[in-house]
Image: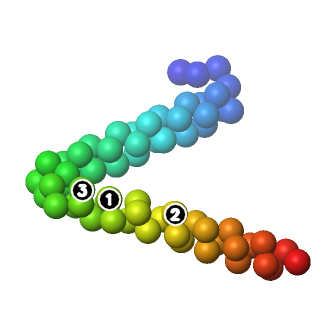
Amino acid sequence: MFASTNYTSTAIRNYTIAAVTVLTLSMAIGELFNNPNRIATQNTIDNYSSYIGAGLVSYAQSSLK
């Protein structure tokens, strides 16, 4: 079917990545449609993520000294 084994493995890998991406996105859209309260939860997580990121950066800087 394909000319080389390397090309076949690359095609399979790309197809798998595309299939997993489509599956994950469709599940996420379905969850938001069936339970819109998760959007509010996501906003809370987004608000706290900046504090978590700042804490991780601070910890990384202190550990490199």
Residue 27 percent location from the top left of the image: 25, 50
Q: Residue at x 64, y 28 (%)?
A: 7
Vertical order, 25 against 54 (above or below): above
Vertical order, 13 against 63 (above or below): above
Name the secondary structure under disc 1. Answer: helix
Name the secondary structure under disc 3. Answer: helix
Q: Which residue, given by chain and number where applicable, does mark 3 sit on?
A: 39
Q: Earlier in the sequence, mark 2 or mark 1?
A: 1
Label 1, label 3: how many angstroms apart (C-alpha)?
6 Å
Label 2, label 3: how many angstroms apart (C-alpha)?
18 Å
Q: Amino acid at mark 2?
A: Ser
Q: Nearer the viewer, residue 10 or 27?
A: 27
Quarter of the picture holding the C terminus: bottom right
In the picture provided, is 64 more to the left or to the right than 3?
Answer: right
Residue 20 tag number: none
Label 2, label 1: how many angstroms apart (C-alpha)?
12 Å
**Category of crowding for the residue at label 3, using alpha-carbon neighbours closer than 10 angstroms: few (below 14), some (14–19), many (at least 20):** few
Q: Amino acid at mark 3?
A: Ile
**Category of crowding for the residue at label 1, using alpha-carbon neighbours closer than 10 angstroms: few (below 14), some (14–19), many (at least 20):** few
Q: Nearer the viewer, residue 47 or 60?
A: 47
Q: Residue at x 58, y 66 (%)?
A: 53
Q: Which residue, given by chain and number where applicable, does mark 2 sit on?
A: 50
Residue 51 percent location from the top left of the image: 52, 70
Q: Which residue, given by chain and number where applicable, does mark 1 sit on?
A: 43
In the picture provided, is 57 more to the left or to the right than 53?
Answer: right
Residue 33 percent location from the top left of the image: 14, 48
In the picture provided, is 53 more to the left or to the right than 49?
Answer: right
Whether the residues at callouts 2 and 3 have beta carbons within 8 Å, the answer is: no
Q: Locate residue 46: give its quadrant.
A: bottom left
Q: Earlier in the sequence, mark 2 or mark 3?
A: 3
Whether the residues at callouts 1 and 3 have beta carbons within 8 Å, the answer is: yes
Question: Seen from this angle, which residue lies furthest right?
Answer: 65
